[in-house]
């Protein structure tokens, strides 16, 4: 698992003294919150695998905890931005500190949300996240990713705490192979396009404050909008490493054409021979052999990220 480093704020002066309370907790003053992060399933596009894409917004909340009690600490979303492996306040100088006494439960999310999140309370209702219809650019691809992290019982420290983010959606990995009557040069020509068809591009995300949720709990945070946006998603043709497309978990029925390749003015389609239901945190890996008049396909499903111990063949 590759690490992504996120730094929040600047290091402030540290004063650490013994606490006189029965709880023997440390007392600190004016200690800024700083973070590093990892991703439970690493980033996908190899040319930016170790960093969150620049200028994405991240929203952060925290509760202070003491024994079995919790209370708001950062109750209004702290807006941060990413870039060059760092996460810094979106507004310069907008830092946050640890409480003098008590540890924190932390919650953070990155997504392409509808509406204003900055300065709002932790969501009590679902937020709409939308993946981009054009994912041929790295910027739009990363905007399409939805990630969530929690960290429990974090005491103030003169260093960085680590948040582990989870990918909340699914992805297709599409690799083209030149078949009969077709060359690699034709597949990578500017006129060649790859389109994923009939995609529901939005999802309702309702995070909870449960610390360290398992896969089932993470999946339960997602739901289908009442009036979903359905449209194609365009991705670059790739004959070397394949290309990734982020999309919400959803179902495609047998007989549906889900991928279209436009080659030399002709449209070729990959049609499912079985039902396909996408799961959160999974990668659906398609190798499409493009012949002059048809597409032949093989597919597997793995966990999203390197080091997957799962590799299941899909009979589609």
Image (cartoon, helix red, strand yellow):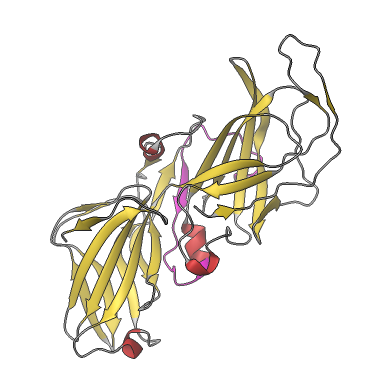
Check residue 128 for magenta coloring.
Answer: yes
Q: What residue span does the magenta drawing correspond to? A: 117-138
Check residue 263 for magenta coloring.
Answer: no
Residue 311: where, in percent of width, then height? 28, 55
Q: Is residue 232 left or right of residue 210?
A: left
Magenta region's main secondary structure?
Answer: loop
Q: Quadrant of residue 233?
A: bottom left
The one of 305 and 174 positioned closer to us in this rendering? 305
User: Quick one: quadrant of the C terminus?
Assistant: bottom left
Q: Is residue 302 left or right of residue 136?
A: left
Q: How many marks?
A: 0
| Above/below status of 88 relative to 163 | below
Residue 303: where, in percent of width, then height? 35, 51
Residue 252: where, in percent of width, then height? 22, 55
Q: Quadrant of residue 240?
A: bottom left
Tell me which residue sits at (58%, 59%) in the image. 51
Tell me which residue sits at (37%, 77%) in the image. 238
Residue 280: where, in percent of width, then height? 36, 47
> Is residue 115 visible to the viewer in this orientation of the structure?
no
| Above/below status of 263 relative to 41 | below
The one of 59 and 150 positioned closer to us in this rendering? 150
> Is residue 157 visible to the viewer in this orientation of the structure?
yes
Tell me which residue sits at (28%, 85%) in the image. 263
| Above/below status of 265 relative to 100 | below
């Amino acid at each position: 698992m590759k690490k992504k480093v996120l730094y929040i704020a600047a290091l402030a002066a540290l004063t650490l003294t013994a606490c006189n309370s029965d709880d023997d907790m440390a007392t600190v003053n004016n200690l800024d919150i700083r973070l590093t992060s990892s991703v439970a399933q690493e980033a996908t596009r190899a040319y930016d695998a170790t960093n969150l894409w620049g200028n994405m917004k991240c929203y952060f909340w925290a509760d202070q905890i003491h024994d079995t009690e919790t209370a708001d600490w950062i109750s209004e979303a702290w807006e941060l931005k990413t870039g060059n492996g760092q996460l810094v306040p979106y507004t310069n100088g907008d830092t946050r500190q640890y409480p003098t006494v008590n540890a924190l439960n932390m919650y953070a999310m990155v997504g392409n949300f509808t509406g204003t999140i900055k300065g709002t309370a932790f969501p009590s209702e679902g937020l709409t996240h939308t993946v981009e219809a054009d994912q041929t650019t790295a910027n739009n691809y990363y905007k399409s990713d939805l990630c969530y992290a929690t960290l429990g019982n974090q005491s103030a420290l003169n260093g960085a705490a680590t948040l582990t983010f989870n990918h909340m959606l699914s992805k297709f990995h599409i690799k083209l192979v030149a078949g009969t009557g077709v060359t690699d040069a034709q597949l990578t020509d500017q006129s060649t396009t790859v389109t994923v068809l009939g995609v529901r591009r939005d999802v309702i995300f309702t995070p909870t404050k449960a610390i360290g949720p398992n896969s089932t709990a993470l999946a339960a945070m997602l739901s289908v909008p009442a009036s979903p946006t359905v449209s194609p998603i365009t991705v670059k043709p790739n004959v070397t490493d394949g290309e990734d497309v982020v999309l919400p978990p959803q179902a495609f029925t047998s007989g549906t054409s889900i991928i279209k390749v436009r080659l030399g003015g002709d449209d070729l389609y990959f049609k499912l021979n079985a039902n396909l239901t996408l799961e959160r945190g999974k990668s659906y890996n398609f190798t499409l052999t493009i012949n002059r008049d048809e597409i032949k396909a093989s597919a597997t499903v793995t966990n999203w990220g390197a080091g997957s111990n799962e590799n299941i063949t899909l009979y589609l």
